[in-house]
Amino acid sequence: MIRLPRRTAWFALPVVAAAVGWGWWSGQRAVRQARAELQVLESRRAELERTNHELARQVEALKHEREARERAARESMDVAAPDETMVILPPTPTPTPTALPAR
């Protein structure tokens, strides 16, 4: 067995304790970051599932409902049915920031 001088032991103990503490802290930080990323990914997945469900519903409507097919055709070609009125609005201008008066 190797015996270390007391001075070396008193120096090594805080260094080892600091290394262990630093490793624990780094691990905890990594766990927090992974949990935050998991939350973001789960919310994105839920959003994609809702979008997918809505698109599947639209596909089924287009397959089985004549009105849905007619509406989709009119929307894609920008035309109106004989009993409809089409209103075309100009694009809204984007507001520009006004300069503050000089003091």
Image (cartoon, rainbow, N blue to C red):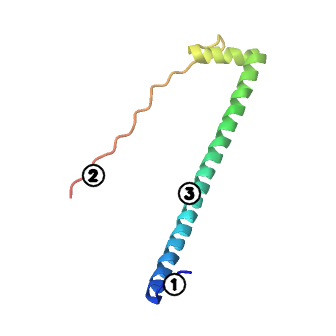
- Residue type, mark 2 in image: Leu
2 left or right, relative to 83: left
Report the Cα–Cα distance between label 3 and label 1. 42 Å
* Secondary structure at numbered mark 1: loop
x and y, in percent, of residue 32 in the image: 58, 60
Report the Cα–Cα distance between label 3 and label 2. 42 Å
103 left or right, relative to 15: left
20 left or right, relative to 55: left
* Secondary structure at numbered mark 3: helix
Q: Residues within 10 Å of mark 1 (few under 14, many from 20)?
A: few
Of residue 94 and residue 13, the one placed in the foreground of this image is 13
Residue 34 quadrant = bottom right
Vertical position of residue 68 compared to residue 13: above or below: above
Q: Residues within 10 Å of mark 2 (few under 14, many from 20)?
A: few
Mark toward the start of the polypeptide (1 vs 2): 1
Residue receiving disc 1: 3
Q: Quadrant of the N terminus?
A: bottom right
Residue 32 in sight here: yes
The label nearer to you, 3 versus 1, is 1
- Residue type, mark 1 in image: Arg
Q: Residue at x 59, y 60 (%)?
A: 31
The label nearer to you, 3 versus 2, is 3
86 left or right, relative to 51: left
x and y, in percent, of residue 90 in the image: 45, 25
Residue receiving disc 3: 33
The label nearer to you, 1 versus 2, is 1
**Residue 100, which numbered label?**
2
Report the Cα–Cα distance between label 1 and label 2. 76 Å
